[in-house]
Image (spheres, rainbow, N blue to C red):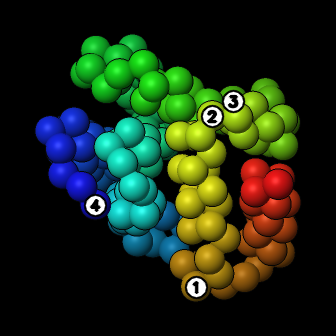
Amino acid sequence: MIYTEKIKRALKLCFEAHKEQLDKSGLPYVFHPFHLAEQMQDETTTIVALLHDVVEDTDYTFEDLEAMGFGEDVMEALKLLTHDDAVPYMEYVALLKNNPIARAVKLADLSHNSDPTRLEAMDEWAIKRAEKYKAAIEFLEN
């Protein structure tokens, strides 16, 4: 991972936002966005990877992030990545496909979320989720 001033700011915010959260296997949730960020190739995608779940899963708002000065390209990608439950899942995926920043982060997110070794057990819910994510990966890659 590269470490610019904006990335350091995003790292701190990511940690602060997710520090009390656990993932589905009981691990600190913050490891997930850190894992995605490690795969990114530039400042913008790294920041988006770190912050991709902040608005969706915490009390932070887009306005909070805008006030922190992350930039229009970051904000656009974050808005695309934040899934509104009123929008069917594959429609949400289709909306972000043409944004290269959101697309890169979503592919890494889907890959990490599809990793069965992250879960305690592959129950019926986990299998259905993995199938949904596989379809989304195929859509974004083609």
Which callout, 2 or 4, points at the residue further toward the start of the chain? 4
Element type where label 2 sits in the image: loop
**How far is mark 2 from mark 3, CA to CA?**
17 Å
- Badge 4 vs badge 1, beta-carbon distance below 8 Å: no
Tell me, for residue 84, which label it has, or none. 3
Q: Quadrant of residue 111?
A: bottom right
Residue 12 placement (x, y as % from top left): 20, 44
Instruction: Look at label 4 and name its amino acid.
Output: Met
Residue pictured at 42% horizontal, 19% vertical: 72
Q: Is residue 85 visible?
A: no
Left of 6 or right of it: where is 53? right
Rendered position, 72 above or below 99: above
Find disc 4 in the rendering and name its residue. 1
Q: Which image quadrant for residue 131? A: bottom right
**In the displayed structure, would residue 59 be above or below residue 90?**
above
Counting from the top left corner in percent of width and height, residue 119 is at: 59, 79
